[in-house]
Amino acid sequence: MSPARLAAVAAAVLLAAALLRVVPGARGQEETEHEEEFSYVPGDEHGPEHWGSIKAEWAACGAGRMQSPIDLSHERVSLVRSLGYLSHSYRPAEASIVNRGHDIMVRFEGDAGSLVINGTAYYLRQLHWHSPTEHTVDGRRYDMELHLVHESAENKAAVIAVLYEIGGHDDALLRQLEPAIRRVADVRDREMRVGVVDPRRARGRASVYYRYVGSLTAPPCTEGVIWTIVKRVRSVSKHQLELLREAVHDDMENNARPLQEANHRDVSMFRPKPNKQY
């Protein structure tokens, strides 16, 4: 076996071992919806550097060794083609939109489909946005990051992250949701039905992705989350980004958690062979 193949196999084995180590609690995969208890303002008494000491159940925010987000630097990324294409099947489903104060969330009420990782199905529960991006790529931070949050029958979480930069094109999903976002703007905990939402508009068709094991990026910062970050950066219009920022509370317009230590975690990348179209 070639050295390159040995390295790929070793990376896959280490990732699988990391997945087996973590068994989150039944409700541990839910980010807190009480945004008045924490903030994203550096130096604030409720800021990111203090999240771990605000509540006992948030201790992982300060003491955890597998926290997210991280920088996806090329030095720690290994190409692992055995990861394969993302196996997901999304479908339109009834949904509501919620202003959680620290972000805008779309909660699916029906079956919006699932993502399969290592034979386990993770069902799409909700999606929400952060601005600017929480993950960075070789130190570069983009304008917005969408999180599609999935949960398995065993209450383990998997999140697909899509990065955006301001460009000349509207994002199709946000275009559909703009009227609803305006109606829930500046009203914390207001929830309204938005009819059928198609999550396929959010996922896109890009094949190349990063994969690592981390945590929720807001309290309680539960670890054991399988992260998939799509490499292709998508476009969002400036007015859509401003709409999301203005809808949340004033001190939450920048709702990106600072980068966390990688602590020697492996980051894998899937990329099809060169003769494939992607």
Image (tube, rainbow, N blue to C red):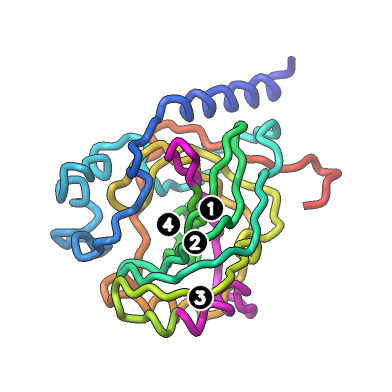
Horizontal side of 229 relative to 270 (left or right) equals: left
Q: Nearer the viewer, residue 105 or 244?
A: 105
Is disc 1 placed on a helix, strand or loop?
A: strand
Q: Nearer the viewer, mark 2 or mark 1?
A: 2
Please determine whether, in this image, residue 165 is positioned above or below residue 33: below
Q: Nearer the viewer, mark 4 or mark 2?
A: 2
Residue for badge 3: 194
Residue for badge 1: 124
Type of amino acid at the residue the image marks with label 4: Glu
Where residue 218 sits: x, y (%)? 32, 53
Q: CA distance from mark 4 to mark 3?
A: 27 Å
Q: Nearer the viewer, mark 1 or mark 4?
A: 1
Q: CA distance from mark 4 to mark 2?
A: 27 Å
Is disc 2 placed on a helix, strand or loop?
A: loop
Type of amino acid at the residue the image marks with label 1: Leu
Tally the numbered discs: 4
Q: Earlier in the sequence, mark 3 or mark 2?
A: 2
Q: Residue furthest top?
A: 1
Q: Earlier in the sequence, mark 3 or mark 1?
A: 1
Where residue 101 sits: x, y (%)? 30, 70
The segment highlighted magenta reads 151-180
Q: Which mark is residue 134?
A: 4
Residue at x-position 35% and y-position 39%: 26
Residue at x-position 55% and y-position 50%: 229
Instruction: Determine which quarter of the picture holds residue 183.
Output: bottom left
Instruction: Determine which quarter of the picture holds residue 131.
Output: bottom left
Residue at x-position 70% and y-position 34%: 81
Q: Which mark is residue 109?
A: 2
Q: Nearer the viewer, residue 272 or 26?
A: 26
Q: Residue furthest right?
A: 275
Q: Earlier in the sequence, mark 4 or mark 3?
A: 4
